[in-house]
Amino acid sequence: MKADLLLGLQWGDEGKGKIVDVLAPEYDLVARFQGGPNAGHTLEFDGHKHVLRSIPSGIFAGGGSAVNIIGNGVVLDPVLFRGEAEALEADGIDLHSILRISRKAHMILPTHRLLDAANERRKGSSKIGTTGKGIGPAYTDKVSRRGIRVGDIDDPSFAERYKAVREAHLEQLEALGCPAAGSESFVAAEAEWFDAIDYLRDFERVDSEHLVNRALDEGRKVLCEGAQGTMLDVDFGSYPFVTSSNTVAAGACTGLGIAPGRIGRVYGIFKAYCTRVGSGPFPTELFDNVGATIRDIGHEYGAVTGRERRCGWLDLVALRYAVMINGVTDLIMMKSDVLDSFATIKAATEYRLPDGSVTRDFPFSVGDEAEGSGNVEPIYRSFPGWMTELKNMRHAEELPKAFTDYVKFIESELGVPVTVISVGPDREETIFVR
């Protein structure tokens, strides 16, 4: 048995949570493999909206029968985890029975949040636009080999280990001109964090790499869930305006301990257009009423932060690159209904570079300005809009020809079939094409 993988192909916010929720009933395990609590996976069903930060999106599937795993590649904030978990259990989810947490997952400390804010202030106009959740500093400590992992809470020396890291962080904050030691707010945050650690102890902590591989050996089906999107990958995204982990398919191998040969289908999710939150280049960004209209119709605001998303036309150069990097086998097209009222739809098929040459390949840099794109000019192809409401359609044969022509063009550009089309946020508003 091989593990299937689901991830975003753009700058995040593609709708991964909904699709994991739709697919999860077919799986025995759903495992999140990277990212932190800035990842707001939104699920809607039965008239209710749920936003998940760190907990996998398979918790609602099949009456909660699937085992859900927070993998070693995730960085976990105990305080935010507690709030998320308590809200889910108040909704009737028996989370303690279905959730497992990797002992090797690193934790976000109270000082990580302070360092995140201090580092962003120091960068001024060159700031990355982080969510301020302490995720970057937590990953920094991980690769600096001084991080604190979930499994460490069972060690008798846990308090001493925490104190050593905290003191190092406080020295850094002092050097950054943001002293925190002794402040009432920090003392309160630290107390809340230790209370959340006690809450975390009530959950089953596992060596998740053994759990996942043993499940595959036994013929059980595993779905790996990614956070953010390919263009935010720390190696292959629009660096330095990226997240701090590997959001690509290879991240599932390191984030769950799965060998590359054990990856099966790779579901790549993309919107019918593009969005981006925070700073960084965005070649197809629209600064006119079209972009504003897409934002309004698509309710493009961060699920966790509430931040307004930047909107633009579909970027097939970046998408082609993401398909290649991830080895995508199945494409899933989200928010198709948002473009229902547009008479003309555009998609960028190539970039014009500063020297005047044209390329279909995603280049080393698409600009390092805080907004827009300084290095490339997108070359668009236009399509007639379908001018038809897709929201109530449930079968592929109902879809209008203009829409299916647009989808076929995307498939021809990417060389991968679109197998699922989403026409609304609810789990029922989903069309399986193949």
Image (spheres, helix red, strand yellow):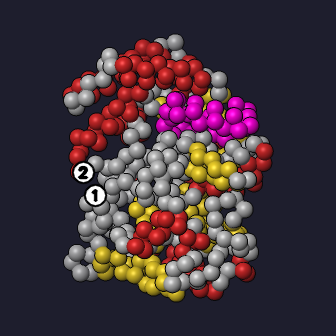
- Crowding near the residue tagged with mark 2, few <14, some 14–19, many ≥20 C-alpha atoms within 10 Å: some
* Residue 8 falls left or right of residue 112: right
Number of on-image labels: 2
Identified at 30% across, 61% down, the residue is 371
Which SS class for mark 1? Answer: loop
Q: Where's residue 105, x and y in %? A: 52, 34
Q: What residue sits right under mark 1 in the picture?
A: 370
- Crowding near the residue tagged with mark 1, few <14, some 14–19, many ≥20 C-alpha atoms within 10 Å: some
Magenta extent: 68-97
How far apart are labels 2 and 1 at the CA level?
7 Å
Identified at 62% across, 28% down, the residue is 205
Q: Are marks 2 and 1 in contact (CB under 8 Å)?
A: yes
Specify the label residue 293 is tagged with.
none
Does 198 appear above or below 385?
A: above
Query: Which badge, 2 or 1, comes first in the chain's sequence?
Result: 2
The picture quadrant where one finds residue 395 is bottom right
* Quadrant in the picture for the C terminus: bottom right
The picture quadrant where one finds residue 276 is bottom left
**Does the magenta portion include 392?**
no
Residue 220: in sight, yes or no?
no
Q: Where's residue 161, x and y in %? A: 42, 18
Specify the label residue 126 is tagged with.
2
The three-letter code of the residue at mark 1 reads Ala
Q: Nearer the viewer, residue 404 or 73?
A: 404
Q: Nearer the viewer, residue 119 or 150?
A: 119
Identified at 48% across, 52% down, the residue is 302
The three-letter code of the residue at mark 2 reads Ser
**Does the magenta portion include 75?**
yes
Q: Where's residue 184, x and y in %? A: 36, 19
